[in-house]
Structures are given as structure tokens and as C-alpha cells.
Amino acid sequence: MTLSREKTKQLLDNGVLQAYAHNRAIEAKNLEDTWAEICGNAVFDSPATSYRVKPTPQYRPHTTSELSGLVGKVVKCKKDFDMCCIVLYACPRSTKIKLSNDLWCSAQALMEKFVYPDGAPIGVKLEQ
């Protein structure tokens, strides 16, 4: 595969080549004009605008009404993954929850400091 200087510059400017070199996921537009992750070695044979660095999923904290759905769920501390807690109670008038270790925290703190046991973030995934 030969890249022209112009196309190389475009791929460098949009961060695709740097991300590819650092093993970040790259996506390309497919025939349905949607983004699909490139598996294996990339061949940059389409226009530079047909490639992008795969966006990192973004999350927001649970709202007051959503917190009740977390009651009974197991969560793990990001800093001390062996520390396991259960969400015991969600305050119906605020974004505070009580964990089984007698810790009260906000929905924001829960999202920042804890994950589900499989490592998945605690929060509501935002559409991209």
C-alpha cells in the first residue's frame, strides 16, 4: 500500500495514524455508510475522511429516579478491586446511595470510584 503525502498528512491530522500505531481501535466507513472497527492490519485505501479513531464511550451518573435500579447490585472499588459492596438503599429525594460498608455516596462519586464486578462502568451510557 502506498500513501500519498497529502493522504498521510490528513491521516496524521485526524489522529488516525498515531492511534493506529499505539494500538487504539480504528474505524472505517463500510458500504452501509456506518462506522465499523478495523480488525487486523489496516489498509488505508479509501479517502482519509473514511477513517476515524473509535470514540471512547461516555457515561453520565444515574439520576435520582434511576438509582433505585441499583439497589441489590454488587459494586467494586476501582482502587481496591478486592473491596466489594452491595448497594443497599437509594435515597428517593437525592442522588445519594448507601453501600453495605456504611458509606453514603452520590451518583457521581459512585460512577467515579466504583465499577461493576466485570469492570463495566456504573453509569448510563450516552449515545454517540
Image (cartoon, rainbow, N blue to C red):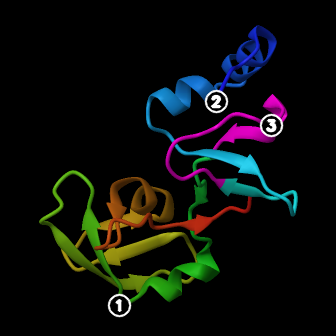
Residue 64 higher or lower than 122, as above or below: below
Which tag is nearer the camera, tag 2 or tag 1? 2
Residue drawn at (48%, 80%) of the image: 91
**Amino acid bearing label 1:** Gly
User: Under tag 1, what secondary structure?
Assistant: loop
Quarter of the picture holding the N terminus: top right
Quarter of the picture holding the C terminus: bottom right
Q: Is residue 107 magenta?
A: no
Residue carrying label 2: 16
Rate crowding at label 2 as few (under 14), some (14 to 19) or many (20 or more) other CA atoms within 10 Å: many
Residue carrying label 3: 46
**Amino acid bearing label 3:** Ser
- Highlighted range, magenta: 37-53
Residue drawn at (21%, 51%) of the image: 79
Which image quarter: residue 44? top right
Q: Residue furthest top?
A: 5
Residue 4, given in percent of the width and then of the height, sits at: 76, 14
**Amino acid bearing label 2:** Val
User: Under tag 3, what secondary structure?
Assistant: loop
> What's the distance in space between the residues labelled 3 and 1, CA to CA?
49 Å
> What's the distance in space between the residues labelled 2 and 1, CA to CA?
42 Å
Q: Which of pointers 2 and 3 lies earlier in the amino acid sequence? A: 2
Residue carrying label 1: 72
